[in-house]
Image (cartoon, rainbow, N blue to C red):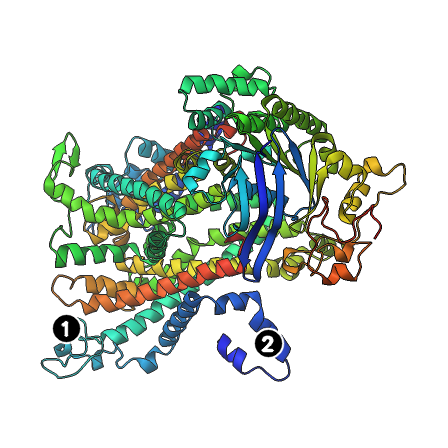
């Protein structure tokens, strides 16, 4: 078990180093950082001084190492566009994205598992078939169209919910939260549904197909043959076995939610990290792009690691031989 | 004495794109208390399907299309699902072929036992645990108390099948359907499992339907034997009688193909041809294309009914 | 397509056509109304995109034909000033929405198809190379694939797009945007192909006929081309179809976010981005019709992919 964890952590570090290299190469080779940071009026002396300040005159590995050192300490450089430290900008924006991701993740997992189980158990039912057909449309519907549709119905036609922004937020320490005001919560509803719907559909379809597979298994037949109630068979026996593979995919989906927040944040003008990133791509603000890339990699790698360990905790068969990855 | 189980003219049908198939076609038999009935035949003969019909676990679209099943005189084939559920496990236990896949891999075996006991006997959790322990001891799991919290993958195949048997018997059913209980096991373990099943059922007075394709297992364990061919009962009778003086030519072929009966001949006898698929059952007696004794009547008349234990127009041992 | 094949069998090979007509594959197509409708929709959309210059009443990108007075004309109603009628209305600059959709469809389909083609070529080659060479080549290719797979494709595409934009001199950015977009989507999508191809090729590699081909001294590439490639066609076809739907959606998303097709070559995603601005002011048609077209395209390609997967791989059902 311990050896397994250590090996997985080692792999994770390698992935992060590679991503760091990509991020650093972006810094170093995409455009000229000196060009980007100095205005039109610059002297050769300015250029030389900045090159030394940035350490651009040192050998590549040294630069890379310094870059990593900075990144680990939360120093991602200065945004070309805003002229402020990237770390500060991201820290301001992170609560908006994390709160949005949290609510939509909750929505996607709870509803996804519930509907997946329902459609698997009532496979022949009318309701289950309607849900399955709708879910196929849901998978084909681009996220931004869902957002626009929701805005049209609930903001334009019904005028119930706001179509953009976070509403009123309250500062709790350094964290600006929308959970504590009515307008903040109202503002969360449409973006959360938009962001969570696609993941919800995926989780639902996955739970359904895994559950149907499990319901055909011998031990389910045997559980039935022992006269256990449908409830026990479906939930204690089938659902538990269904969740083993579902956890992997669901975990990865949580990472995807943060990434897909870019789209939702653009549609709803949600002042989060995703909107920051898309603006950075539009204006080729490399330090912001690089920082975003590294932060999201750390997030993904961590989620992956947790998912693997969780897998390990749920399935007793893996506990015996640690070789199964 | 009233039979524990009576199957009367049971018909199971499966509607398909190519028409309606009949994996079980007018099968009838009785089972006395404590009796072990061996059901034998090639794969696809309808042995397992009969067992599944009795316990009410046919997979859709297969369904009972005719006949009756009576448990201690009560019809059970038309019970609503919730009532049938209370009979499964409580009155009729079942042992499946593959112990590797019969147990839920994520639940300790003690939990699987106690949930079954709690469901049917309405006892407290701690009492159910105690009974679970006793059940494991009875099927011969060494150091059973330490194994209650073990997961299925921590047991060997033979041990797992013992656990499965304990699960089937833990609510003291009056009938156990054992569907090929030894097929997936090592040869060395097979005899132990059969002996265990026999001993337990004798101790508890449980009747057994022992489904197998292995005539050797039948000879060893069963009191009576039912031979199935293409969904129909070909012959039924006491094991000794059927094995020594088979009356149906198919039984004769099966018995002749047992190694113990080859009497030092260089080669085992075998029945020519293969069993027809359900989509292409010949008219007349289903066995006629493979039967060495087949005559015109076998091909043209409707299929023969069981008479004196054999469904044959020209049973062996009688002048034709 | 299949209809004409069935009704007018070539006299020389009627039995061959009959065989095809009655094969399981075609049988399952004929008996799947969803697949038929989806194919018809896809064909209509592809044909209208191909023949857009012939079908479109206006060329939306020829400033000479534009009249700002025609701006915001509702669908099917005469314009208040010019009395001109537009089937699906006009946008803010007086461009005919029907025509912009046809031209947008062209861009969307072209980018989607080109990206999937590129991803397929890349994935198939890398997958075959990994399976055939093994060793450290395989390890590197598959590790890269694994790592990339942990990141959502759309994010990878955005990053590649952003980096490429950084490399392109500003004056060429608009011209290059479409090609950058294709490469970005392709690079985010090759992994699926590589994994499946490698898996299938590893299985085929150990089959007797490939071993036999080796024994008689055929070279590696020749064996792959002649023996392995035909056997992995059907999974690749299924993935290509499903990838096409994803690529179309990815392109639309990127363009909607303003990091895809340039304003000079608007795709369906760009049109939706423009239309979103008029959601509150009541000019719903500028948004609605491009959105419906995109949805119809993505949904029918998805349904075709779904059906194809079931038809080619009965085990999955």
Q: Report in which chain the residue with disc 2 lies.
A: C
Q: Residue at left 48%, top 44%?
A: A213
| Real-space CA distance between mark 2 and mark 1, rounded to the nearest whole angstrom | 53 Å
Residue located 12% across and 44% down the image: A167
Q: Chain of mark 1?
A: C
Q: Which mark is residue A162?
A: none
Residue C110 pos. (x, y %): 39, 68
Residue identified by numbered label 1 = C72
Q: Mark 2, residues whose alpha carbon is within 10 Å: few (<14), some, or many (≥20)?
A: some
Q: Quadrant of residue B40?
A: top right
From the viewer's perspective, is residue B96 above or below residue B47? above
Q: Which mark is residue C17?
A: 2
Within-10-Å neighbours for mark 1: few <14, some 14–19, many 20+: many
Q: Is residue A276 left or right of residue C302?
A: left
Instruction: Indicate left or right for A142 with C283 as reference.
Output: right
Image quarter where the N terminus of chain B lies is top right
Mark 1, secondary structure of its residue: loop
- SS for dot 2: helix
Q: Nearer the viewer, residue B195 or A131?
A: B195
Up/down of B112 relative to B313, above or below: above
Give the label, 2 or 1, closer to the camera.
2
Q: Is residue C5 in view from this perspective?
A: yes
Q: Are marks 2 and 1 in contact (CB under 8 Å)?
A: no
Closest to the observer: A176 or B127?
B127
Q: Nearer the viewer, residue A135 or B280?
A: B280
Looking at the image, is A264 positioned above or below residue B284? above
Residue C216 seen in render: no
User: Mark 2 or 1 closer to N-term?
Assistant: 2
Q: Mark 2 vs mark 1: same chain?
A: yes
Residue A193 horizontal/vertical position (percent): 24, 48
Total numbered labels: 2
């Amino acid at each position: 078990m311990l050896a397994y964890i250590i090996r997985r952590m080692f792999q994770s570090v390698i992935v992060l180093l590679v991503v760091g290299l990509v991020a650093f190469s972006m810094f170093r080779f995409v455009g000229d950082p000196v060009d980007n940071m100095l205005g039109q009026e610059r002297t050769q002396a300015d250029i030389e001084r900045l090159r030394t300040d940035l350490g651009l005159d040192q050998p590549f590995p040294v630069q890379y190492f310094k870059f990593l050192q900075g990144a680990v300490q939360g120093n991602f450089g200065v945004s070309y566009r805003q002229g402020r430290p990237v770390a500060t900008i991201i820290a301001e924006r992170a609560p908006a994205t994390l709160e949005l991701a949290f609510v939509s993740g909750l929505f996607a997992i709870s509803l996804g598992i519930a509907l997946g189980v329902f459609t698997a158990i009532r496979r022949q039912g009318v309701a289950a078939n309607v849900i399955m057909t709708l879910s196929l449309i849901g998978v084909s519907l681009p996220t931004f169209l869902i957002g626009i549709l929701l805005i049209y119905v609930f903001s334009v036609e019904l005028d119930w919910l706001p179509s953009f922004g976070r509403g009123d937020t309250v500062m709790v320490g350094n964290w600006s939260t929308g959970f504590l005001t009515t307008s903040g919560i109202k503002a969360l509803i449409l973006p959360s549904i938009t962001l969570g719907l696609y993941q919800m559909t995926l989780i639902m379809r996955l739970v359904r197909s895994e559950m149907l597979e499990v319901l055909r298994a011998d031990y389910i037949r045997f559980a039935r043959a022992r006269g256990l109630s449908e409830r026990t068979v479906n939930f204690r026996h089938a659902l538990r076995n269904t969740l083993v593979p579902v956890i992997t995919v669901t975990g990865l989906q949580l990472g995807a939610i943060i990434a897909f927040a870019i789209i939702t944040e653009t549609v709803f003008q949600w002042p989060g990290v995703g909107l920051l990133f898309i603006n950075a791509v539009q204006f080729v603000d490399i330090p912001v792009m690089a920082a975003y890339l590294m932060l999201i990699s750390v997030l993904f790698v961590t989620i992956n690691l947790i998912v693997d360990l969780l897998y390990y905790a749920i399935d007793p068969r893996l506990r015996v031989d640690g070789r199964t990855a | 004495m009233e039979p524990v189980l009576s199957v009367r003219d049971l018909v199971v049908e499966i509607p398909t794109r190519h028409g309606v198939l009949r994996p079980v076609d007018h099968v009838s038999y009785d089972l006395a208390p404590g009796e072990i009935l061996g059901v034998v035949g090639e794969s696809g003969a309808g042995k397992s399907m009969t067992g599944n019909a009795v316990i009410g676990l046919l997979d859709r679209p297969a369904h009972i299309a005719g006949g009756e099943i009576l448990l201690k005189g009560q019809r059970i084939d038309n019970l609503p699902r919730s009532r049938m559920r209370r009979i499964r496990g409580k009155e009729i236990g079942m042992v499946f072929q593959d112990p590797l896949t019969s147990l839920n891999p994520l639940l300790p075996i003690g939990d699987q036992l106690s949930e079954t006991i709690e469901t049917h006997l309405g006892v407290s959790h701690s009492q159910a645990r105690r009974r679970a322990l006793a059940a494991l001891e009875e099927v011969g799991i060494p150091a059973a108390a330490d194994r209650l919290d073990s997961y299925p993958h921590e047991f060997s195949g033979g041990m797992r099948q013992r656990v499965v048997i304990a699960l089937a018997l833990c609510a003291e059913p009056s009938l156990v359907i054992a569907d090929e209980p030894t097929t997936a096991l090592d040869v060395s373990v097979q005899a132990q499992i059969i002996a265990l099943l026999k001993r337990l059922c004798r101790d508890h007075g449980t009747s057994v339907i022992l489904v197998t394709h292995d005539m050797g297992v039948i000879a060893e364990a069963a009191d009576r034997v039912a031979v199935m061919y293409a969904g129909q009962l070909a012959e039924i009778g006491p094991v000794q009688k059927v094995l020594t003086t088979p009356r149906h030519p198919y039984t004769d072929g099966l018995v002749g193909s047992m190694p113990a009966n080859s009497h030092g001949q260089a080669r085992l006898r075998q029945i020519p041809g293969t069993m027809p698929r359900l989509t292409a059952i010949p008219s007349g007696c289903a066995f006629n294309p493979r039967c060495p004794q087949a005559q015109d009547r076998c091909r043209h008349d409707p299929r023969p009914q069981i008479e004196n234990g054999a469904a044959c127009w020209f049973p062996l041992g009688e002048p034709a | 397509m299949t209809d004409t094949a069935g009704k007018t069998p070539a006299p020389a090979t009627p039995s061959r056509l009959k065989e095809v007509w009655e094969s399981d594959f075609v049988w399952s197509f004929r008996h799947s109304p969803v697949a038929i409708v989806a194919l018809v929709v896809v064909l209509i959309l592809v044909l209208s995109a191909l023949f857009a210059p012939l079908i479109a009443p206006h060329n939306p990108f020829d400033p000479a034909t534009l009249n700002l007075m025609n701006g915001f004309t509702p669908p099917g109603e005469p314009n208040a000033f010019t009395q001109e009628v537009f089937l699906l209305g006009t946008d803010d600059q007086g461009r005919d929405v029907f025509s912009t959709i046809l031209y947008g469809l062209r861009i969307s389909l072209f980018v989607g198809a080109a990206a999937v083609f590129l991803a397929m070529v890349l994935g198939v080659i890398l997958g075959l190379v990994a399976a055939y060479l093994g060793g450290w080549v395989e390890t590197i290719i598959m590790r890269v694939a694994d790592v990339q797979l942990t990141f959502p494709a759309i994010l990878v595409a955005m990053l590649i797009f952003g980096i490429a934009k950084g490399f392109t001199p500003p004056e060429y950015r608009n011209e290059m945007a479409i090609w950058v977009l294709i490469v970005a989507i392709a690079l985010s999508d090759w992994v699926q192909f590589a994994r499946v191809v490698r898996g299938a090729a590893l299985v085929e590699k150990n089959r007797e006929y490939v071993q036999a081909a080796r024994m008689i001294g055929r070279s590696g590439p020749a064996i792959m081309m002649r023996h392995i490639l035909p056997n992995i066609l059907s999974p690749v076809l299924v993935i290509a179809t499903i990838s096409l739907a994803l690529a179309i959606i990815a392109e639309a998303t990127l363009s909607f976010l303003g990091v895809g097709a340039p304003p000079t070559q608007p795709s369906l995603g760009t049109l939706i981005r423009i239309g979103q601005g008029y959601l509150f002011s009541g000019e719903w048609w500028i948004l609605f019709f491009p959105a419906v077209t995109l949805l119809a395209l993505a949904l029918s390609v998805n349904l075709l992919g779904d059906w194809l997967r079931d038809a080619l791989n009965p085990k999955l059902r």
